[in-house]
């Protein structure tokens, strides 16, 4: 392996190590978020509130799209991601209603 290839391999490893750390942060952050949304779901069930709040969901999507723009992330991707997360949260909230 020549020097350029060795440097490229070392840089590739650094990038991948960073990606692995970021993946761990994402997983733990999502776990914490779902703990909070499950608490919201239980509270909604206890007070006979609907599992979905379309106005809040729309506001959150708008907010996340703006954050994505600020972070130089594709807002359409951010919207798809949050829409998926919201659908999972609503599914959990519906389970608490049963």
Image (cartoon, rainbow, N blue to C red):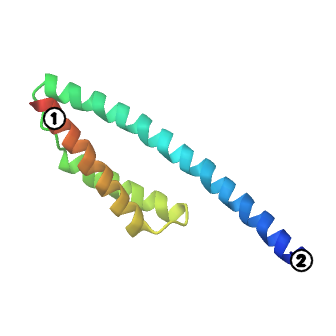
98 or 77: which is nearer to us? 98
Is disc 2 placed on a helix, strand or loop?
loop
Quarter of the N terminus within the rendering: bottom right
> N-terminal of the two: label 1 or label 2?
2
Left or right: 28 as drawn, with respect to 22: left
Residue 54 horizontal/vertical position (percent): 19, 50
Q: Residue at x 55, y 61 (%)?
A: 71
Task: Determine whether 7 is above or below 98 in the image.
Answer: below
In the shown orientation, is residue 70 left or right of residue 38?
A: right
Percent position of residue 41, x then y: 23, 32
Horizontal relation, residue 3 to residue 66: left or right? right
Residue that appears at 48% across and 44% down: 27
Determine the image quadrant of residue 95. top left
Secondary structure at numbered mark 1: helix
On the image, the x and y values in percent for residue 46 come to 15, 22
Q: Residue at x 84, y 69 (%)?
A: 7
Quickly name the residue at label 1. 95
Residue under label 2: 2
Location of residue 53 (image quadrant): top left
Whether 41 is drawn above or below 64: the answer is above
């Amino acid at each position: 392996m020549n020097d350029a290839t060795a440097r490229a391999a070392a840089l590739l490893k650094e990038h991948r190590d960073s990606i692995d750390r970021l993946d761990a942060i994402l997983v733990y952050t999502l776990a914490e978020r779902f703990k909070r949304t499950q608490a919201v779901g239980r509270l909604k069930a206890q007070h006979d509130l609907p599992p979905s709040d379309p106005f809040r969901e729309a506001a959150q999507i708008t907010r996340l799209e703006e954050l994505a723009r600020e972070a130089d992330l594709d807002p359409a991707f951010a919207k798809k991601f949050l829409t998926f997360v919201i659908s999972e949260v609503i599914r959990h909230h519906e389970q608490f209603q049963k």
